[in-house]
Amino acid sequence: MTTGPGRDACRTSGRADAERRLEPAPGGGVRVSMTSIASEKSHLLVASGIIALLGAAALLIGVVVGSIFVPDHDWVAETISDLGAGPLEIIVDIALYGYAAGLISLSIGAAHAHLGDRWWSVGIFSLAIIAALVVMVGARNEYGDSDRDGIVIHIYLVYLLGVLFALAPLSMAKGAGSVHLGYRRIFRLCGVAWAVAAPVFFFVPTSVDGVYERLLGMIALIWTCSLAWLILQRGRDAAVRGV
């Protein structure tokens, strides 16, 4: 009978083996996913997921509150950029900073629970860059007020956000699908929907571009909240296993 450290090592190895998942292999059959939850820290994943969800809530609440308190704001015809200009711009700024904090938290959690190959890594870096771009959008205060003083970079930040919000979910879809196929479908749907709908924004009549932009925002929030929930649930699973 094995006792002592040797038995503990066997238990750890057996637990890790039990936590490997069977995945479809090219050409039929199955393959074993070597991604193991046994080496992940539950508190880090849970905190990452919660902070990310709070960041998404901050953005949603900030936009709603701003739309209510900013005088004469028309949420159908006026964009969030318009909402962020003027004396109450602090409302949108705080919402953007909160969302950026959530994105940074997502990148940390996704890096810790690395669920894929190089494409998952592309998604991680995309998240971090998106967070930096969101902070720059809020800090530069160039949106919605026709600012022409100095170098205006807002439109270039928007272009980069447009590319990365499509790239990130698509690059992480395969890895997320190793947890549940539902995540893969959501990630791909959000990535494709964003890639198709985002360029159309520049051709939408100004009478409705506000509501169109908010619909784009909902696509981004659905994806980021789905990733946050995946990471949170993975953390809870790790906690059950005593990690």
Image (tube, helix red, strand yellow):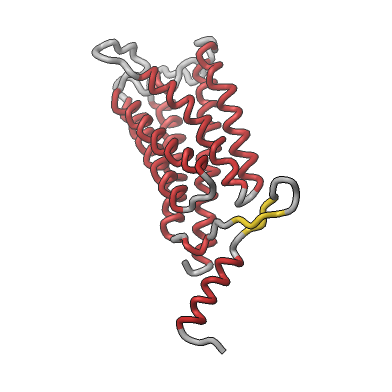
- The image shows residue 100 at horizontal and vertical percentages of 38, 37
- The image shows residue 243 at horizontal and vertical percentages of 47, 66
Residue 28 relative to residue 184: left or right: right
Residue 194 relative to residue 182: left or right: left
- The image shows residue 194 at horizontal and vertical percentages of 56, 27
Looking at this view, name the residue that lies furthest to the left. Answer: 150
Quadrant of image for the N terminus:
bottom right
Q: Residue at x 48, y 21 (%)?
A: 75
- Nearer the observer, 124 or 100: 124
Looking at this view, name the residue that lies furthest to the right. Answer: 28
Q: Residue at x 44, y 35 (%)?
A: 126
Q: Residue at x 49, y 58 (%)?
A: 235
- Nearer the observer, 208 or 123: 123
Total count of labels? 0
- Nearer the observer, 13 or 214: 13
Which image quarter: residue 66?
Answer: top left
Q: Residue at x 36, y 19 (%)?
A: 154
Q: Is residue 70 above or below residue 105?
A: above
Residue 149 relative to residue 214: left or right: left
Looking at this view, name the residue that lies furthest to the front. Answer: 27
- The image shows residue 105 at horizontal and vertical percentages of 40, 46
